[in-house]
Image: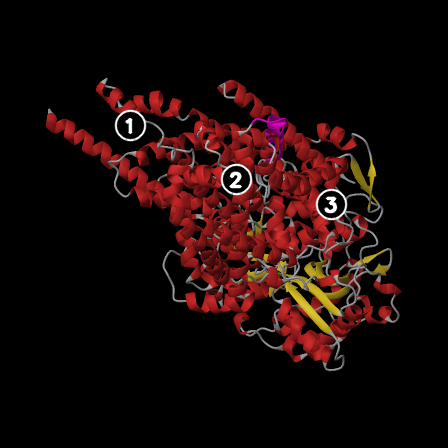
Amino acid sequence: MSKKLIPYFFLGPALLLFICFTVYPVISSLILSFQTQEAGQYVFTGLDNYIRLMKDTIFLKALSNTFIILIIQVPIMLFLALLLASALNSQLLKLRGIFRVGFFMPAVTSLVAYSILFSVMLQDTGVINRFLGFLGVDQIRWLSDAFWAKVSIILAMTWRWTGYNMVIYLAAMQNISEELYEAASLDGAGKIKQFFYITVPQLKPVILFTAIISTISTLQLFDEPYNLTNGGPSDATMTLGLYIFKNGFEYYDFGYASAIAYVVVIIVAILSFIQMKVTGDE
Amino acid sequence: MSNSLKQRKLTSKLVLYITLLAGLVISIFPFYWMFVGSTNHTSKMFTNPPTLTFGGQFLTNLTNLNDSIGIYRVLFNSLFVSLVYVLLALIVNTMAAYALSKFEFKGQKTIFMILIVSMMIPYQATMIPLFKLMANFNFLNTYFALIVPSLCLPFAIFLMRQNLLAFPTALIEAARIDGAGEIRIFLRIVLPSMKPALAATAIYLFMAQWNNFMWPLVATTSNDMYTFPVALSSLIGISIIDYGQVMTGITIATIPIIIFFLLLQKHFIAGMLGSSVK
Amino acid sequence: MKKLTSLLSIVLIGVLLLTACGSGGSNGAEKKGNGEVTIWATNINVPVLEQAAKEYQKDHKDFKVKVVEMANDDIRSKMVTGLQAGGKGLPDAALLVDDGLTGWLESFPNSFVNLSEKEGFTDITKDFPKYKIDSISKDGDVYAFPFDAGPVGVFYRKDIFEKAGVDPAAIKTWDDYIAAGKVIKEKTGTNMLSYDSNDSTVFTILLSQQGFGYYSKDGKTTIGTKESQNAANVFKQLADNKTLLGTPGWNAWVTSLSDSQTATAIAGGWLVGTIQQQLPDQKGKWGVMELPAFEPGGSQSANQGGSSFAISKNSPNVDEAYDFLKFFSTDFKMQELAMDGGLFPSYLPVYESDLFSKPLEYFNNEPVWTFFANQMEKIPSVFYTTNDNLARDEIIKVQSEITTGKDVKKSLDDASERLKNREK
């Protein structure tokens, strides 16, 4: 085998699959985004779908909702995951294995099960409000108030994915040398100082990795709003992922749905690029 | 003084444990509730507050579930599709990650960037063309359609690449000087030290495939090809839904992932970022 | 190591062969003329269809059917995918919900068989209520075999009504209903109505009771009309009296019933099956009455839900599917079978069956099914369009706005305005 061809040999199978099953459908749907359906046939309409997008208030609302959720949820979740990972990384902690599996469980618990449970518990007269009422807190309209519905979505997402990110951080922490902590301890730095001055900087590449992955999945957020609020009340929890789905499968407008999808792709690409630049990673 | 210090340490430890335990309860509560649901009659599903005690209906639910969806066939489909997928995807994506991390060639950066950007495309947008493709080649309702389209998974390439970057290139060069072939180097020198990373990726792949819903739903056209999520979804009627069956099914469907996680978690913890190279 | 590698490659080759060949042979409608009719249907329909096929095979030895069970949402996703892909991967026939069928007929013309072109089909239609036939027709042609229906009733809790001293028989109009709700709330603390606030079913019922869908025949939306204001006012007044409970989603709604948080539930007759299954403890506590009218003597009937069998135009087995479904839809015994299986058929002759006059133990031995059967001929026809899904979206927003204080007229006009920008 010629030396030059070796990397292509290793890359070949993946590339071939990628071209057949990703590139081809992507180009296909990209073309679709410049088309619209008339009497059952797709016809080209140039940039119409994209122009319509700029004036579509629901799209703009979905965009802003998605960003609000992104900006609030991702940092909270990643910070919590970091804290949990630091706690579970301590050799002194008992029952680490149980905690590890337990916190990871939400990521594998069935969506069907938890969406039924959450929608039942979070309704106006649900068990959570009853408990809060017991503590003297007024009834919170968890899923039917514009503000609280967003909070509920954020809580549900955080519940589901914190443990997953924690596991990624735990893995990365195995790479941080114990000596760093020992030296810091001798210098009199407390646990909190150690967390901010050793753990966080050392984990920077992984934090970036999880931030990018979380950004991508939040921008495609679909499961929670679809199951808990159906995008309501009044589009307060409409997300880009849900809006794409609705346009395709409920309004039968795949051309428009594709246009939304590619606008999202451009936005995420720009965001990820900025994230990489800001954190100064290659 | 030392006494009060001890006391303070003890309280902070206590606080830590209580917080962690509270978090643990919140984390596993829906799972527990689902398990409770699988042992109760469907009418216990919608009580307020939720039913939290086990009932004696598990076997009834299990029998009914088996009558409705045929557990063995569905379990076989899911296991076969997921395990084959994990095996093939590990090979394909690890090879790609190896090429992208340990070689320098034309188009390398561009290919990597394209792969990463492709992760951002919502699946809803590409599903219809992919479906058309499968239909044109008569692949609908085959294992091929369930496994092959998602074999090249950029996330897995990304993850493996992160790990491979940490692998010392000097080792590879030394082997080359010793006259080892490229495939041999990959299989014998690189792969063995990648076990933790492979385990981590395997769990991710297994989870993704096992829980995959939308694609298997559209790609299968008969009950005997259904995977677990699709079969469970078929239990949902317009007005009549036996939640006892649904919860039993979900419980059964969750167990394999947990087993998979428990088996591989030691590697997983050590493997996410290539700490194995020592 | 070498052993391992060779073992691995053998496994791999085997696996590749297996996946490539797949389980083959089970490609449903894809294979030409194998005579096997594939039908997609939701859970309780499956055993009924299979039973019917057995019966049918007695006279048609070569007939084979494969009924594939799937959720209604899944049927929609798969149908839309197949229709988008130019009719690929579709079954020979599918059980489709009526209010969605028209949208598909408009968005995907030439995808379903026009049954009116078949000889003798028009004779069949006279055995079904007019509203049902109208709901599956486009431009006068019928595109599906009518099957089950959802005649609406107000399900009410007898015990709660009694405790509050309210006589259900005295509720004739929506004003009476709203007034009764006030009394019930004062006396028992229970809400008059809980509804799924993620959906628009109750609003749709109130509109269709007045003979309207979300569009009138001239293509204008009914959102903003007097009828829609009537419907919205019911919500508004119930909310103002604090007797309305919105629950997010079906599951939460069923919980509100099981938790006795509401004195009434407004739904199609199929709710009988749901509450018997989910609320066994409330046996004997439920009764059913007609919808209140908007004005004395006005319409008290509506339909919610119901589905019909459409045949895919691409199917290689159109004739086989047609003959079987004709048998199924118009055979007395088959429709009795469906009734017995928990479905409410729309085939009018079957209401003569003893099954309908049978008292239901759960409902204090009242013949609840007779009540619903009597509704069938009174239900007004409603016009459906492909834009209905958009209109429903906007109505869900209206529900949320008016129950939190926004003016009814303003909310409806805004919704109508938003809808205009979204229409196809």
C-alpha distance separating marks 3 and 1: 57 Å
Q: Of residues A56 and C248, which is closer to you in this image?
A: A56
Q: How is the image coloured?
A: secondary structure
Where residue A182 sits: x, y (%)?
Answer: 25, 24
Q: Is residue A107 visible?
A: yes
- Is residue B117 part of the magenta span, yes or no? yes
Amino acid under disc 2: Ile
Indicate which label's residue lies in the foreground, 3 or 2.
Answer: 2
Q: Quadrant of the C terminus of chain C?
A: top right
Tag 1 subunit: A
C-alpha distance separating marks 1 and 2: 37 Å
Tell me where residue B93 sits by quadrant.
top right
Indicate which label's residue lies in the foreground, 3 or 1.
Answer: 1
Depicted B126 relative to depicted C299: above or below: above
Judge left or right: residue B163 versus residue C334: left
Same chain for labels 3 and 1? Say yes or no: yes
Residue A178, label in figure: 1
Magenta region, main secondary structure: helix
Amino acid under disc 3: Tyr
C-alpha distance separating marks 3 and 2: 49 Å
What is the residue that sits farthest to the front in this orientation?
B179
Disc 3: which residue: A252
Q: Mark 1 or mark 3, which is nearer the start of the sequence?
A: 1
Specify few, some or many for label 2: CA neighbours under 10 Å numbering under 14, 14-19, or 20 or more.
few
Which span is picked out in magenta?
B104-119
Amino acid under disc 1: Glu
- Identify the residue at horizontal 47%, vertical 45% (top origin): B202
Depicted B170 relative to depicted A146: above or below: above
Disc 2: which residue: B183
Where residue B264 sits: x, y (%)?
Answer: 40, 46
